[in-house]
Amino acid sequence: MFHWLEKHPFFFSVGVFLVIAFAGVIEILPNFAQASRPVIGTKPYSILETTGRQVYIKNSCNACHSQLIRPFKSETDRYGHYSLSGEYAYDRPFLWGSKRTGPDLMRVGNYRTTDWHENHMKDPAGVVPGSVMPAYRWMYTNIADVPTAYAEQLTNAQFFSVPYNEPIPMKDGSTEVVKMANSVTEAHAMALAEAKEIAADMKDQNIKDAVARGEIPEIVALIAYLNSLK
Amino acid sequence: MENRPLEYDYTVTKMFMFTTIALGIVGMLIGVILAFQLAFPGLNLMLGEGLAEYTNFSRLRPLHTDAVIFGFTLSGVFATWYYVGQRVLKVSMAESRLLMLLGKLHFWLYLITVVAVVVSLFAGVTTSKEYAEFEWPIDIAIVIVWVIFGLSMFGLIGIRREKSLYISVWYYIATFLGIAMLYLFNNMEIPTMLASAPDGSHVGGNWWHSISMYAGTNDALVQWWYGHNAVAFGFTVPIIAMIYYFLPKESGQAIYSYKLSLLSFWGLMFVYLWAGGHHLLYSTVPDWVQTMGSIFSIILILPSWGSAINMLLTMKGEWQQVAASPLIKFMVLASTFYMFSTLEGPIQAIKSVNAIAHFTDWIVGHVHDGVLGWVGFMIMAALFHMAPRVFKREIYSKSLMTAQFWIQTLGVVLYFTSMWIAGITQGMMWRAHDEFGNLAYSFIDTVTVLHPYYTIRGVGGLLYLVGFLMFTYNIYKTMSARPIEESELQSASPMGA
């Protein structure tokens, strides 16, 4: 049979393809059938958080930081409750990472503050002596891209039925609504409102001035995203 | 025409040899910079504060992996295909205008895509999925390049004179099919430019931006099914194709066992894809997928060692050649590192070992003993073998080859030993608790302790790069030397001397 296949490239290729495709069909498809449902308390990202998530991706933060807490005592002691599948229901793409040059950030919003992030991104080794993380000073002057984030939100709502403007059940039994804008102008206004709250906790006068002028520096959006990780 | 011996046409091979070397230098240089940035963070600012955004570790890191995988390695795969393919199929590219056109088109579109990738990664345009960072316009370009490669490959196979496909061709076909399937499914994404606001207005924003079709756990499952098997069909399968051709050809020895080649080929095809789950142990993917990933990783030792043992036994009774020929040295070391790496991988995939190894530098070490020792050595050996035949000149210096061999071997050894120690140290420190059940170390303790190992790794990488520059010089001097008149047996089979 193998000698015959070696003389017939077409059937050889079909054979190879069937053999390699087999594993994917068995391993991947069943999980897709039971699509990952959000756990209670998991909200879609707001406009400023989405913008910040794009800043996080743009700078490949996931190359050094994971967002996946494994079920070991050492990890739950250090980072908090281990990860649940449903907590990632709105993560497109997933940001688990594969290397921890720095600590996990899955629940960093629980134990770091806006103030801490502000100083840390400016001078990591000043905040954590011995840190090998580079500074990200350009984030303090680059302006965040709200329209792209808004397009991402709309795509999520249109193609994947992500529940914006709908009540989301919370752990304490209440519900919350994550609002999505009706136009890009409104999206910018909503992002700016969120940015003002973040900037109020920051010390950098240039950032405060920029937000007062109606601009959103990348660092403000990034911090909004990091604070949402809980 | 009828009675003249077949003249193979190496135009496309030469073009891809050029990108193999150029992108090899780029990829390895960036790798060395990254290694030293981890040891000395000040290097992130090497070109000043103004360019910090582009010289920063996080921007360079995807550039390094992609340059080495899709630049250096893939160019090597293409260069050898356009050489080996003609020879084992007994047909010349020059016989078909269409094939020549496809081959050249393949090269130029590939080069344009590479430039687009470099520019976009520097700019921070990335989907963040490892080894699949490119946004949808580049993904489409990559698919087109791949289809043209396929047409060119199957075109050559279609007009072959040798009826039976040599082992190397099996592996090249598998490379084409495997990457095609994996790449397509992992890069399913929706361009966000399709979205418009509820009031009907166009939103704007970056036209190249997209989001993945899959969310969270599913996205991770597809990504590591891809990520693991990009290694399979980029770093394993085509490199085996190379060694199955070049080792017998260079040593004058026939492949040790045909049955073992059959067993290891079909075994590898069947088993490799199951093992992807080992990247996601202790994550939120279903338990049974994790267990399958673990078990199949262990089983994977069999077909991998099958190939490697087949290589090494090909040298049976001819081991004096290892001492005599620097080129045989490269290939024997490559197969040895293949065995080493395919034993280390399954060990790391055992759940209890993975608990320590995952997220640490031990994984980085594992990748690099495979890539530097196996992939790098084999591609350089292939180019060394092809250069005299393609450029019709003797290799410039054999002693330079030997020196390069030892410098790079030392580099690889420094690299993986330092990363083993670093990774295991880090993993053990993360999990250490004191007698009261509190964490024994803060995270930064586990970072600062790695400094000496990061420095050693940087030195190892630098030695490897130096060796690669010696290789480049050797090939350059070979190319630019005066041609010698040489006629070789055109109809020799790959088994023949």
Image (cartoon, coloured by chain):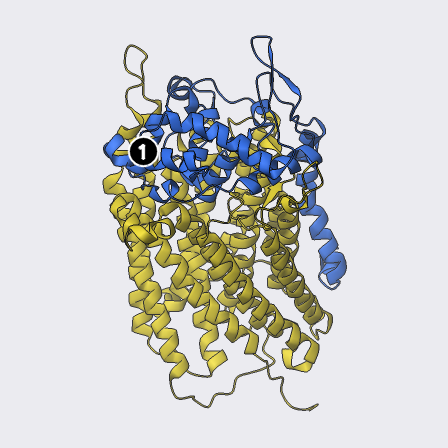
Chain colours: A blue, B yellow
Q: Residue at x 73, y 52 (%)?
A: A15
The structure residue drawn at horizontal position 69% and vertical position 52%, both measured from the top left corner, is A16
The x, y position of residue B291, in whole percent, is 57, 29
Q: Which residue lies furthest to the top in this view?
A: A173
Give the tally of numbered discs.
Answer: 1
Q: In this view, does A41 lie above or below B38?
A: above
Query: Alpha-carbon neighbours of circle 1 within 10 Å: few (<14), some, or many (≥20)?
Result: some
Residue type (three-letter) at the residue carrying disc 1 = Asp
Provide the residue designation for mark 1.
A204
Q: In which quarter of the image is the N terminus of chain B?
A: bottom right
The x, y position of residue B140, in whole percent, is: 64, 56
Residue B197 rendering spot, x and y as whole percentages: 67, 38
* Residue B313 in view in this figure: no
Q: Where is residue B35 in the image (x, y as percent from the top left)?
A: 32, 48
The residue located at (67%, 21%) in the rendering is: A166
Left or right of B361? Residue B490 is right
Nearer-the-camera pick, A135 or B319: A135
In the rendered image, which quarter is residue B400 located in? bottom left
